[in-house]
Image (cartoon, helix red, strand yellow):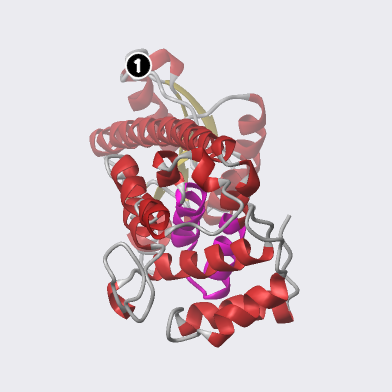
Amino acid sequence: MHEINMDNADTVHILVVDDEEDICDMIQQAVELSGYDCSTAGSGEEALEILVKKNVNVIITDIRMPGIDGIELIQKVKEKHNTDIIVMTAYASGLTYENVIELGASDFVQKPVSPKELLVRLKRVLREHNLLFERKKADIKLQESFKKLSKALEQTVNALTTTVEMRDLYTSGHQRRVTQICCAITKEMGLSSHQVAGMRIAGLLHDIGKICVPSELLSKPGRLTRSEFNLLKEHPQVGYEIVKGIEFPWPVAKIILQHHERMDGSGYPYGLTRDNISIEARILAVSDVVEAMSSHRPYRPALGIEVALEEISKKNGRLYDPDVTEACMVLFKEKKFELD
């Protein structure tokens, strides 16, 4: 589709198609008096030949013609050309305005044609063509802007993720692996693609709050003291505070805040229970535990995926959401899901 220069009528070309020469001449004269360039064709076949050689903005065509009639002409034009069509006919008994529009025409007039009415309709079709062109152009710009924003968002999220992981080499890659599990579980549960996209961002950022935890505490080889663990438990709240001002199209801050809550209320920071915990946070909770247990940590070697799955299965319903647990088990046990 291209824009029609309405300020320069000479650049607008109209093609009149009718097997009655007098009608073609009459319409051509009216169109040219309005300043538009105009050609005529006595048949659908001739019209198609002209379209190959010349850029035509609007076709004004009769319906009943020998050979290729107006209906077939509309179909052939719409297959290969971006040309608007106005249909005219004296035989409208079996043809409604809706029928013509559904075929791809832009307007419909009955014979005998009033040149004045036809010109009004012609100008309206040209204006609507330009409005549609402007809207499509705006849509393309909007899509380009969205792609740029999405890329910038992804780069920002990756930078934040890397910042946290650089302080804790033992858990480097943890957030990315958790994200893989999160997205896979979300899909397995049949949740929307929008939710999958949100889980990807939340998964990558879920431990951003650990930036407030001393690095020596994150890499401590032994068990944490009560005071050290209490300090570590602040990271969901800190993560929430860091991202809450970012206008994500998903509840990322809330998911981060709740990802250590548990179904029975034994989690932190607020001891939320069951439906008070968002489904996304429940998915993240299971994903986080499975990844952490199956990977190496400073205070213990990797326990393996089987031990991790046994853990969530044993505490299914008490700590972890049953639907999420089931989806996770199906992924790893039946579908042989593996982390990159």
Horizontal side of residue 77 vs 111, given as left or right: right
Q: 127 or 192: which is nearer to us? A: 192
The x and y percentages for residue 93 are 36, 68
**Residue hosting label 1:** 35
**Range of the magenta residues?**
178-206
The image shows residue 153, relative to residue 175, as above or below, that is above
Q: Does residue 35 appear in the picture of this structure?
A: yes
What amino acid is at disc 1?
Answer: Gly
The reply to whether the magenta stretch includes residue 188 is: yes
Q: Does residue 21 appear in the picture of this structure?
A: no
- For image coordinates 58% across by 44% down, the residue present is 77
The x and y percentages for residue 329 are 63, 80
The x and y percentages for residue 225 are 44, 58
The x and y percentages for residue 252 are 37, 52
Q: 76 or 245: which is nearer to us? A: 245
Q: 235 or 143: which is nearer to us? A: 235
- For image coordinates 34% across by 20% down, the residue present is 6
Horizontal side of residue 124 vs 181, given as left or right: left
Where is residue 266, by image quadrant?
Answer: bottom left
Where is residue 336, by image quadrant?
Answer: bottom right
- For image coordinates 60% across by 68% down, the residue present is 290
The image shows residue 330, relative to residue 36, as above or below, that is below
Q: Secondary structure at mark 1?
A: loop
- How crowded is the residue under tag 1: few (<14 C-alpha within 10 Å), some, or many (20+)? some
- For image coordinates 66% across by 25% down, the residue present is 53
The quarter of the image holding the C terminus is bottom right
Helix, strand or loop for the magenta stretch, by majority: helix
